[in-house]
Image: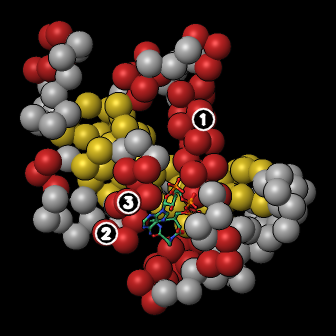
Amino acid sequence: MSDALFLRPIRPGDDTGKFSLGTPEAQPLKSFLKNQAKDYHHKNVAKTFVLVDSPDDSRVLGYLTLVCSEIKNEASTRLDDCGDANKYTTFPAIKIARLAIHNDLQRGGYGRTVMDWCIRHVVENIMPHAGCRFLVTDAKHSAVSFYKKCGFTMLESEEKNKHPIMFVDLHKLTASLPSAQK
Ligand SMILES: CC(C)(COP(=O)(O)OP(=O)(O)OC[C@H]1O[C@@H](n2cnc3c(N)ncnc32)[C@H](O)[C@@H]1OP(=O)(O)O)[C@@H](O)C(=O)NCCC(=O)NCCS
């Protein structure tokens, strides 16, 4: 396995059938990649990006699926710099609908690499063109620590939920970056 991995949009010829996640709990993530990801990507329902060894490799080592979304404007997300826009009950967001790293590669830093790529992708390719204040996800309980390590915060109202909503405020994140990284 090379150290340099690539993320690119999923392609019709990609080998999604052998992707393994180990636990039965993760079966829906495996099944989505095998049965729906390519079709949803083509039909603009959900966009999937695959982690591969090289751009022309078809063996999927991990994947990320993004959709348009929104987040409730409640106490834990209330924005002090949005002025009149705080009257709205929701704010625009991009949602990480699916994220998974192949069994054999988990805990090797690849999840964080995919997340860094995801944030850069949203900041550079979506935020300049459409209102998009947050990156959100409905986290599995087993992945909450991972998301916290990647800078996500849990909505206060979500602590007891099976898949708690977690978010990153992209505007605040980009405002805190040195200008060379923006
Ligand atoms: C969750 C997942 C995407 C994380 O990817 P990964 O490559 O294993 O994570 P990384 O190695 O990049 O970990 C980044 C940090 O999070 C921590 N972390 C990762 N998974 C963790 C877990 N389950 N519990 C606690 N900490 C975890 C790592 O220790 C690391 O911390 P560090 O920077 O202090 O060393 C991956 O384990 C996976 O695919 N899991 C099964 C499917 C799943 O749960 N997907 C999430 C759906 S919401």
Q: Residue at x 37, y 51 (%)?
A: 148
Left or right of 10 on screen, residue 59:
right
Q: Count the marks: how many?
A: 3
Residue neighbourhood size for the residue with mark 2, other residues' Cα within 10 Å, grouped as few (<14), some (14–19), many (≥20): some
The first of marks 1 and 2 along the sequence is 1
Q: Quadrant of residue 176?
A: top left
Q: Amino acid at mark 1?
A: His
Q: Residue at x 64, y 58 (%)?
A: 110
* Image coords of residue 64 (percent x, y): 57, 56
Quadrant position of the N terminus in the picture: bottom right
Residue picked out by circle 2: 141
Residue picked out by circle 1: 121
Residue neighbourhood size for the residue with mark 3, other residues' Cα within 10 Å, grouped as few (<14), some (14–19), many (≥20): few
Left or right of 81 on screen, residue 103:
right
Kindly identify which numbered label has been placed on residue 145. 3
Q: Quadrant of residue 107?
A: bottom right
Label 3 CB-ligand 1 distance < 8 A:
yes
Q: Residue at x 17, y 65 (%)?
A: 161
Does 121 appear above or below 12?
above
Mark 1 vs mark 2, CA separation in Å: 26 Å
